[in-house]
Image (cartoon, rainbow, N blue to C red):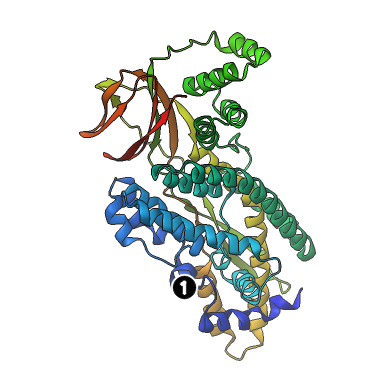
Amino acid sequence: MNSILKKSTIVTFALLLSGCANMSVGNLFSHYSAQTNDVYQLVKSGEAKQAYTLEEQEVGGPILDNMELGRIALLSEQYAESKTDFEVAEQAVRVQSDQATISVSDSANQVGSLVTNDNLIDYKPADYELGYLHLYLSLNYLKNNDLEGALVEVRKANYIQEQAKRDREKDLQKAEKEARKEGVKTNVGAILANYPDVGNQLAAVQNGYLFYYSGLLYETNRSLNDAYIDYKRALAVAPNNKTVIESVQRVARKLGMRNDIKMLEKQYGAYQVPKRSDSRVIIIDEQGILPPLSDWRLGLPMWDSQGNFVQYNLALPYYKNTKRQVFPPLKVNGKSLASDQVADVTLMAKNDLNERIPAMVIRQALRVVAKDELRKTSRNSKEEELVNAVFTIFNTLTEQPDTRSWQTLPAQISVTSMSIEPGKNQIQYQGNELDFTVKEGHTVIVWSSRQGNAVTWWHKQLGEI
C-alpha cells in the first residue's frame, strides 16, 4: 500500500485545523444540494430576487458559486450584477485551466479528499456548464446592444466545451491508472453494477440552444457561412424544430446552395419564402430549472487481513426520476404559442454525470482502501476501541456525495418564431406583459426565462434577416 495512505490521517486532521481550498464544516459533513436547498427552492418557485440575497459564497467554490449568482441575478433582472458574477466565474475557470502543475494546495485537496469526500477537490465545471457560462455572458452583451461582444462569447463557448471534453477524458485515464496501482478494479465493477444511473449513454452531448443562438447572431452580423454551419448543427440536435428548419432553409437560399436546398426540400418540404414586408418575432423560451443531484448510498462489506468484518458506506450523486414541470404556453397578441424544444438541459446534465461517474467511483473505491488502512493503523493505539469508534463515526459523517452542479440552469429551452403585424405587439404570460415594436420586414428576438408564475424577459431588434 502506498505510504501516503498510511500517513493520510495526520494530513487530514492537519487540514481540518489549518484549512484548505474547499474545506468547510458544510462540505465536510454535508453536500452541495443539501446546503443550497433554500435558495434552490426560491429560484424554482420564481422568487429569484429573494434567492439572490440569500445565495451564500464559498459553498461550491469560486467557479460554481459565481455561475449560480450570475444566473440568479439574470433571473432577478439585475443585469449588471449578472455580468460581473459571470465574469468572475470565467476568470476563476481561466486560473484553473492555466494551472499546468499541481500546486501544494491542490495536493492537499487530493489527500484530504482521499479520507473525507470529493467535495474537497476543486470543482471542475461540466462541458455543458462552460458552454452556458459563455452563452449567458453573450446574452448580457446582446442586451447591451453589443453584437460583437456577444459573438466573441459564443466563439469561446464552442472552443471551451471541446477543450473541457478532452480534459475530462484525461482525468478518467489518470483515475484508472491510480486504481490499477492500488488493485481496486474489482470493487469499481461491483459499485458500477449497482449504481442507478449508469449503463445507458444518453444522446445529449450537443447544445442545440447554443448552436441556434450563435447561428442567429452570425446571420444578424451577415456572416452567413458561419450562420449556416451553426444552424445545421442545431438542426442535427433538434431535427423537428420548425424554426431551426426554416433558418437552415433561409440561409441556404441566401448562399445559393442548390444541392443542399434540394435535400432540405426533399426532407422538410418546400420553403415558404416570406414577403419582404413580412415581420417576424423569434422567441427563445427557457423553462424551469434543473433537478438537484441527490444522495445515493451503497453499503460495501469488507474483511480485513485479520478476518474482521467491516461495513463501509459509499456515497454518490444521482438524479432522481421526477416529473418535469409543465408550463402554460406563452401568448403573442393573445394567441397561444406552441413550444418547440431546441435543447434539453436535464438530459445533458444526466449524460454528463454518467460520463463522470466512473472516475468518481474509482475515487470512492480508493477511499475505502484508505479508510480501511487507517482503521488498521489505529490498532497500534492504546485506546484502540475509542480510536476505532471515532474513525467509524468520522468516516460515516464525512462520506458525502459530490452533488455540486449548476442547478439553476433551465431544464429545457424552446425556440419558436411566428409572423406578426408591423408596429406594436405584446407577449403575455400569467398576467405578465412585454410590449415590443417591429418595423415592416424586420425581425425581433424575445428572450424569456420562466420559473413558477414568474418570467424574466426582454427583446432586441435584429433588423432584416
Q: Left or right: 426 with respect to 444?
A: left
- Compared to residue 130, the image places residue 18 above or below, namely below
Tell me where residue 463 sits by quadrant: top left
Q: Is residue 408 visible?
A: yes
Residue 249, percent from left and from top: 56, 17
Tell me where residue 325 sits by quadrant: top left
Tell me where residue 258 sits by quadrant: top right
Q: Residue at x 54, y 71 (%)?
A: 395
Task: Check disc 1: other Cα within 10 Å, few if <14, some if 14-19, many if 20+.
Answer: some
Q: Is residue 319 visible?
A: no
Q: Residue at x 62, y 37 (%)?
A: 200
Q: Left or right: 331 with respect to 274?
A: left
- Farthest residue to the right: give it: 181
Residue nearest the observer in this picture, 198 or 346: 346
Q: Residue at x 69, y 57 (%)?
A: 171
Residue 289, percent from left and from top: 40, 43
Q: Left or right: 179 with respect to 325?
A: right
Q: Residue at x 50, y 46 (%)?
A: 149
Residue nearest the observer in this picture, 452 or 382: 452
Residue 147, percent from left and from top: 47, 41
- Compared to residue 116, the image places residue 167 above or below, namely above
**Residue that badge 1 annotates:** 24
